[in-house]
Image: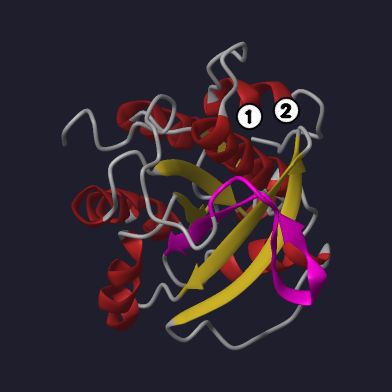
Amino acid sequence: MGQNKFPSLLGTSNGSNHKQSGNSAVGHVGDTYDLSCKVMLIGDSGVGKTCLLVRFKDGTFLSGSFISTIGIDFRHKVIDVDGTKVKLQIWDTAGQERFRSITKAYYRDANALLLLYDVTNRSSFDNVRAWLGDIRDYSQDGVVVMLLGNKCDSTSERQVRKEDGERLSKEFGVPFMETSAKTGVNVELAFIAIGRDLKMKRIKMPQEEAFCVADFVQQGQKHQHCCSN
């Protein structure tokens, strides 16, 4: 795998967007924003992509059974990054194999990709390499990639150690953290880190230091309840 395909910490996003920075634009339901970014949630079916999105967007947890995502779903949320309103257009993708071709078609326009696996499902972790291969083949250069080990609240059912996720993330040079859509652990931090990185790439001021997603995530986790190993 080439070294330049996962420049999550250093690269500059050059993807096209519906709205560019400058005069504030107006989104749905009256939301104003300065720049807009497309974020995709990818990973195997059942890893909790929809639950993670709902937790971030609405602050709630989808308990009980629900219908798996069919194809592509879409929601958005405007976040404030140092006074800049960043609209995250979040695309929730189906993880089933029969929808993979549909998902790949959306990679090219994505500015950020959150790749999830389920810490209670070893096969979802083993498939991360295949997902990273798809990112390498279909995404734009400079895309922000983050690896998330979801459902870290399920300690008794854990099949993937946190160290395994950390090791894999270092191998591919992408930021990593464990999350829980159920408790909310690190969910907001993941999206804020993505939004801050994308904002810095678009409208970084000359006096501002280079932004490192991995360092931001590490610092952010120190202020939150850590998942148990």
**Quarter of the image where one finds residue 178:** top right
Q: Is residue 93 left or right of residue 194?
A: left
- Find numbered disc 2 in the image and state the secondary structure of the residue it sits on: helix
Q: Magenta stretch: residue 76 in it? A: no
Q: Which residues are magenta?
A: 20-43
- Residue corresponding to mark 1: 217
Q: Which quarter of the image is occupied by the N terminus?
A: top left
Q: Residue at x 21, y 28 (%)?
A: 3
Q: Is residue 130 left or right of residue 150?
A: left
* Along the viewing direction, whichever of 219 and 158 lies nearer the viewer: 219
Q: Return the residue nearer the eye: 85 or 170.
A: 85
Q: Position of residue 139 (x, y in %)?
A: 29, 53
Q: Quadrant of residue 10?
A: top left
Q: CA distance from mark 1 to mark 2?
A: 5 Å
Residue at the (37%, 50%) spot, across then down: 15
Residue 171 in percent (x, y) is at 32, 28
